[in-house]
Amino acid sequence: MIGRRRALSGVCNTQFRWHTQWGHGMDTTVRRVTGISGLLIAVCVGITIPLYFIYSGPPPAFNVLTRDLINIVNCGLLLIFMTGFSHLLRRADPALDWIASLALSAGLLILGLTLVATSLEAGVVFGTPDGTVDPTIDGPLAHGNILIHGSIKRMLTAVYLFAVGYAVLRTQILPRWLGWAAYVIAAFNLFFLPSLYFGTDPSHFYSAHGWGNSAFAASFIAYWILAASVLLLRRQE
């Protein structure tokens, strides 16, 4: 009887060590994949941004479809990053499961809206392939995209960054300054929520479709993701 108990105890200890080692190895893999996807996101953003400004008038169809394709790829990378980062937060502190779920939910909504906006932008080009229409400002589809690129994304971005910022400060899986940076960027995004009352001129800093709203404020989450990705890969080493 005693021999059986010892044998059973040995089997249980072996299984526990195996599961612990497997979980640690999986976390290392998730950390690596999440970090690499974040670096690729920065590359995609760096390629895409110039495509929006190299033409003073309506861009040719090839330009629009190219940036839309990159945006689609970028959304896939964001899905990997946000899912991986949420997993790492849960593993660091199971008590933060709700916060990690909130962050992932906000991230998924950002991705869904981005894909919808990308599809509508491409739809303008498919309807007028001669390059005489700027899909970011011309036509009803462009007007329908204004709040998606503006106040709606600013709200969702703020929710995501407040959630991950709080989680980083609680778990310290990354340096605390990254958590405070998430808070600052989230607050800056909230600053642009009322911009929908100030017209749609893209040349204005503070408007529903202004460059400060849809371009400047929107870019900071990419910088945050880049910093988080570099730190994830460095801590792995």
Image (spheres, helix red, strand yellow):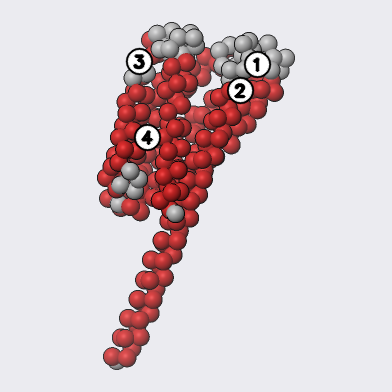
Q: Pick whichever, 127 or 47, lies toward us.
A: 47
Dot in front, 4 or 1: 1
What is the quadrant of residue 119 in the picture? top right
Q: Amino acid at mark 3?
A: Pro
Marks 2 and 1, Cα distance to the nearest angstrom?
Answer: 9 Å
Determine if residue 102 is in view.
Answer: no
Marks 1 and 3, Cα distance to the nearest angstrom?
Answer: 30 Å
Q: Amino acid at mark 2?
A: Leu
Dot in front, 2 or 3: 2
Disc 4 crowd, CA 10 A, few/some/many (<14, 14-19, 20+): many
Dot in front, 1 or 3: 1
- Residue to which mark 3 is pinned: 194
Q: Is residue 129 above or below residue 180?
A: above
Q: Which of the two discs, 4 and 1, labels the residue nearer the N terminus?
A: 1
- Residue to which mark 2 is pinned: 51
Q: Amino acid at mark 1?
A: Pro
Which residue is drawn at the image coordinates 49% and 29% (left, top)?
Answer: 113
Q: Whole-percent x and y of residue 87?
A: 40, 49
Q: Which of the two discs, 2 and 1, labels the residue nearer the N terminus?
A: 2
- Residue to which mark 4 is pinned: 160
Left or right of 67, for residue 178? left
Q: Is residue 211 above or below residue 65?
A: above
Marks 4 and 1, Cα distance to the nearest angstrom?
Answer: 32 Å
Left or right of 99, for residue 71? right
Q: Amino acid at mark 4?
A: Tyr
- Residue to which mark 1 is pinned: 59
Disc 2 to disc 3: CB gap under 8 Å: no
